[in-house]
Amino acid sequence: MTELVEQIAPTMPMPPWNPEEFGRLMRELAVTEAPRLFALVEEFGEGRDARVAGYGLAYEDRADVNSVEGDFRLHSQSAERARTLFEISSRSMGVRRVHVVWLEEGRAAAQQS
């Protein structure tokens, strides 16, 4: 480096963590900020049959859903609002109700069984 560059170059403070701590911080951040995975499940009849209509990601301020057929995408204010919209659009197909099923809770319960 030239003397002029050395005089102008800002001094960068050392980060407050080592590489392992920074890796742990990034993992914690990713887990904390991760969206929640859910399914929209259509119920036919009074508990007679059901099918998964779509899967979604719920963020703090919105929800994004894709139909299982892949031909329908929905951006909504929340998972519950997406459920309502799916329910309205599927009534003509004999769907009684649409349910939001949170998948992480289901996975944890299945692993405990």
Image (cartoon, rainbow, N blue to C red):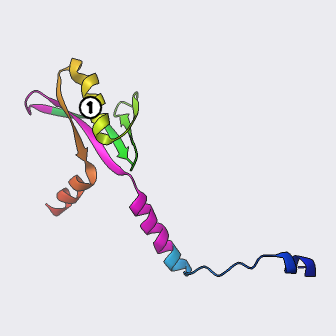
Residue identifier under label 1: 84
Tell me if residue 102 comes above or below residue 108 in the rendering. Answer: above
Q: Quadrant of residue 101?
A: top left
Indicate the quadrant where residue 95 lies. Answer: top left
Compared across the picture, whether 11 is left or right of 30 comes to right
Picture quadrant where residue 44 is located: top left
Find residue 77 and report its horizontal and vertical position in percent: 37, 39
Which residue appears at 24% of the width and 41% of the height?
100
User: What is the x, y in percent for residue 61?
Assistant: 40, 46
Magenta stretch: includes residue 37: yes
In the displayed image of the protein, which residue is found farthest to the top? 92
Instruction: Relative to 57, say whether 13 is above or below.
Output: below
The residue stretch that appears in magenta = 23-49
Residue drawn 16% across and 63% down? 112
From the image, which quarter does the C terminus lie in?
A: bottom left
- Name the amino acid type tagged 1: Thr
Residue at coordinates 50% horizontally, 73% vertically from top-left?
23
**Figure check: 33 above or below 77:** below
Is 96 colored magenta in this rendering?
no
- Identify whether 70 is placed above or below 107: above
